[in-house]
Image: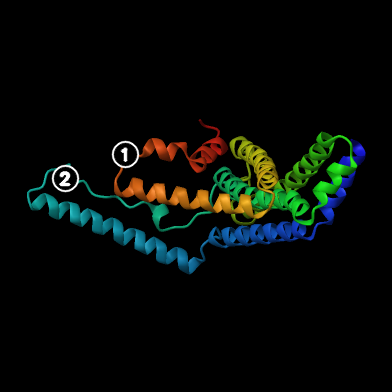
Amino acid sequence: MSRLIGAELNRWFSRRLVWVVFAASVLLTLLVVAGTAYSARPMSSQELAYAEQQYTEMKQEAEREAQQCLRDGGTADECAPWTPERSDFVREPPPYAALAGGMAQAGTMIAAYAALLAGASFIGAEFKTGNIGTWLTYVPSRLPVLVSKAVAAAVGVTLLGVAVIGLFQAGAAGIVLAWAEPGALQPAAEAWAMAGRGLLLVLIAGLVGFALAGLFGSTVGPVGLLLGLMVLQWAIGLIALVLGGSAWLQAALPDPNIQAFLAGST
């Protein structure tokens, strides 16, 4: 069994598509982290002065509108002013816990889609070339062959998830260290737990892709099913927005349940 797993791991890491998926995932991760770092950068002195001016003017305008409303006969509740917050105008570096949590979600989504594609292509290529038939004919017991392939896929997609989610978490820490005040990098147990649950989802996505490709006998089947599911979710969301009354159906879809699992809720 160990020799079979070793052979399958060698096949996994020798596949060009696996490395293409990995490189694309890492590149997308770096782009997202770079964009987040840019949006979280501290404001310049000129930007800060302009934002403070806008905040003061909007606050004064809200108070004038409330006074005018009272003079026109409005009640205190009706004329309660909308009070602008300084955070609406002045950009502050986000807290590490919130940033790490958002990065965990983004990393999970990117790695899960990549894992599904990589896992599906790994076994799908076997059907395309006919190698799966050769293996199952050559080895007397079929179960060890299939298990070894599944183990190799599980190891491969887990490493992919570790790389992508780890880069996102490293990016979150780097952004806080670069832009926030000293001491802002504090433990974030909930965000780290979310990253751990995300890694589990990546593993599940890879194995689901592997299983569906084995069921359909091609890589295209799982990818097409994923696209169909995304369109279905969009259509149900649109119907719920127009007609309403389908909250139970929305709750049964994968996406809200995945988000709930990531957040640690049910």
Secondary element at tag 2: loop
Q: Look at 61% across and 53% down and name the residue there.
A: 223
The residue at which mark 1 appears reads as: 245
The amino acid beneath tag 1 is Gly
Residue 254 lies, with reference to residue 179, above or below; the image says above
Give coordinates of residue 233: x percent, y percent.
46, 48
Q: Is residue 52 left or right of residue 217?
A: left
The amino acid beneath tag 2 is Glu
Q: Look at 78% across and 51% down and name the residue there.
A: 126
Give coordinates of residue 178: x percent, y percent.
64, 56
Secondary element at tag 1: loop
Q: Nearer the viewer, mark 2 or mark 1?
A: 1
> Which of the pair 127/191 is nearer the observer?
127
Give coordinates of residue 68: x percent, y percent.
13, 55
| Quadrant position of the N terminus in the picture | top right
Q: Residues within 10 Å of mark 1 (few under 14, many from 20)?
A: few
The residue at which mark 2 appears reads as: 78
Give the residue at the far top of this rendering: 266
Give residue 41's mark.
none
Q: Is residue 46 left or right of residue 241?
A: right
How far apart are labels 2 and 1 at the CA level? 32 Å
Give the residue at the far bottom of this rendering: 46
Q: Earlier along the polypeptide chain: callout 2 or callout 1? A: 2
